[in-house]
Image (tube, rainbow, N blue to C red):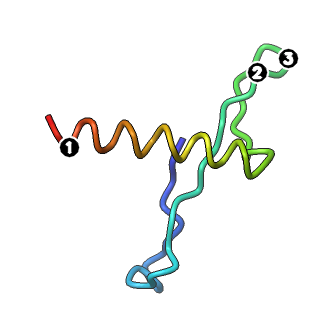
Amino acid sequence: AFFPAETEENENDPDNGLVILKVIHEDGEDLLSTLDSDEELEAVYDLFMESFFQEDGE
């Protein structure tokens, strides 16, 4: 899940970005959780960018 990390007060701030969450399954429920490591974050970012540029080129 991607959520914008900006508010109306700082919408033009160049440091704005995304909050990236993953789904974990616990006790039969789906919960959102932050990523556990820089490696996991980098892997998700790489997949997102690959998909983004692939769709953009079509």
Q: Quadrant of the N terminus?
A: top right
Query: Alpha-carbon distance for marks 2 and 1?
Result: 32 Å
Q: Marks 3 and 2: which is nearer the front?
A: 2
* Whether label 3 touches label 2, CB < 8 Å: no
Q: Is 55 displayed left or right of 58 in the figure?
A: right
Query: Alpha-carbon distance for marks 1 and 3?
Result: 39 Å
Query: Alpha-carbon distance for marks 3 and 2?
Result: 7 Å
* Extreme residue in the top direction: 28
- Where does label 2 land, which residue? 25
The answer to which quarter of the image holds residue 52 is top left
* Whether label 2 touches label 1, CB < 8 Å: no
Mark 1 Cα shell of 10 Å, populated few (<14), some (14-19), many (≥20): few
Residue 39 position within the rendered picture, expressed as x and y whole percent measured from the top left: 72, 46
Whether 5 is drawn above or below 24: the answer is below
Whether 19 is drawn above or below 11: the answer is above
N-terminal of the pair, mark 2 or mark 1, is: 2
Q: Residue at x 67, y 30 (%)?
A: 23
| Amino acid type, callout 3 | Asp
Identify the element where label 1 is drawn: helix
- Where does label 1 land, which residue? 56
